[in-house]
Image (cartoon, grey):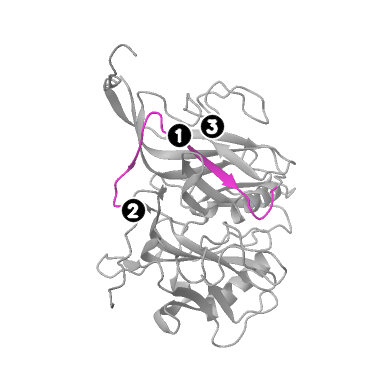
Amino acid sequence: MITRERVESRAALRALKQPLFDTAIFDNAGVNRLNYFQAPQGNPIVAAGAFKSEVDTNLTQAGQLGRPQEFDLYGFNLEFTCDPDDAGATIADLQLLYDAGVFEFFFGQQRPWLQIPVQEIPNGAGWEGTVATANVGTEYFFAKNGIGDVHSYYVFTIGKKPIPIASAENFTARVDFPQGAVTPSQDYRVRCFMKGVLYAAL
Amino acid sequence: MSGNITMSRPAGAALLRKLTNPLYDTIVLDSGVAIQAIQFFRLPIGINMPVTAVAKTEADTNLTQAGQLGTPQMFDLEGFNFESIQVDPTDIANNVADLVALYEQGLFSFFFGQQRPWLEIPLSQIPTGIYLNGTMGFGDTAGSDEALFIGVGESCVDSIYNFTVGKEAIRVHSAEPFNAEITWPNGAITPAGADQRVRVYMIGSLYAAL
C-alpha cells in the first residue's frame, strides 16, 4: 500500500530576542579564513585543545539550528576584542583584519548571499568612554569598527522583512583573506553575530 | 466525607501605579578572588551583600523579595543594562585588566524559573547605558596622573539591550521567579583592582501598589 509521509507536527515555540553567535581565533600562526557556525559547542576552538563553551557559540549543531528551532535573521555584527594596553600591536592587527578581509554569508554550501568587505560589518556595542594618561610609556587603545552602539549592525533585511531560517537549513559565515594569509602579532577573539529572533522550544 | 468541594476565591485585582522604574541589583566583585559566576536578583534589600557583609540598601537593589516582585507588583520588561562601576578611575592599569577579564569571555543569562534561559549572550552585547563621560587633560610634569571612564556602548539613556520582540514588553507577574547571572564558562576571572561594584538593570515599567 502506498501512503503519504506523515506531516510532522508543529512545535509551540518561544520567540526570543537572542542572536546566534560564534567565535573564531584570529591566530598569530597565520590565517587565511575565519569560519563561523560550522563547529558547535564542544568542538575545538583552537588547535591548543580548548573546546567551545556557551560563551563561544550558542549553536549546538554544525551549520544548522536543529529541530524545532527557527530563526528570523535581521543582520550581522563582527566583534573584535582589542588588547587595550598594547596599542601598537592591536592597531596593526586591526588593519590586517579590516583592510584585506571579506565577509561572506551562505545558505547551503557554495552560494553566497552576502559578500562584502569586512569593514562594512560593524562591531556593534563596544567600549566607549574616556582615557587620559600622563604616564610616560603607557598607552591605551579601545578601537572598534563603527560607533559602539547597540543599534549599529549590518542590516540584511529587504523592505524590513527578516529572512527566515528553518530548523534544518544549512548556513555558514566566514571571513576570507583572498589576497593571501595574514599573520597578526597575537591571538584575538573575533565573534560573529547573526542578529534576530530565535524561536526556541518551550 | 462531609462538606462541599469548592473553588478557591480569586485574588482581588489591586489598583496599581504604572511607573517608568527599572529593577536593579548590585554585586561586589571581590578583588584577588577567583570568580566563576555571579547572580543577580536573589538577595533583596536588608540581606547582607557578599564580600562587604553590609546589609543591602535601596542603592544596591529595589527588590524586596528574593527572585520575585511580590504581590501586587508587576513589571513589563523591555531590556537590560549591565554597569561596571570603576570605583577607582585613577587606577587605569588594573581597571583595563579587569574590564577585559569581565567582558571578553563573560556570558550574560536571564532566566524565568530556575533552569530555562530566556537569554544567553556574551556580556559585551549588554550595554552600560548612561555613565560618566567627558573630556580630560593632564599637564602634570611628574607624569603620574591618569584616569579612565569606560563603558560598553555610547553613554546614552536609550542604549539598552532590547529584549522585546515586535516592541511588545514581556510581562513579569508578581510571583514569577526570575534571575540574571554572569558566568565565565571558559575559566574563572580574578579581578585585580579595588573591589568593583557591578549592577544589572531590567529596564521597563513597574506596576506598584497605590
Number of numbered discs: 3
Q: Which residue is mark 3?
A: B42
Q: Are marks 2 and 1 in contact (CB under 8 Å)?
A: no
Query: Which chain is home to disc 2?
Result: A
Q: Which residue is mark 2?
A: A12
Q: B23 above or below A120? A: above
CA distance separating discs 1 and 3: 10 Å
Q: Which residue is mark 1?
A: B177
Residue under the image location 29 percent in, 24 percent down: B16
Q: Which of B10 and B12 lies nearest the eye of the viewer?
A: B10
Q: Which of B11 and B182 lies nearest the eye of the viewer?
A: B11
Single out the mark in the foreground, 2 or 1: 2
Kind of residue sitting beneath label 3:
Arg
Kind of residue sitting beneath label 2:
Ala
CA distance separating discs 2 and 1: 22 Å
Q: Position of residue B55 (x, y in %)?
A: 60, 22
Q: Secondary structure at mark 1?
A: loop
Kind of residue sitting beneath label 1:
Pro
Residue under the image location 41 percent in, 25 percent down: B70
User: Magenta residues?
Assistant: B166-189
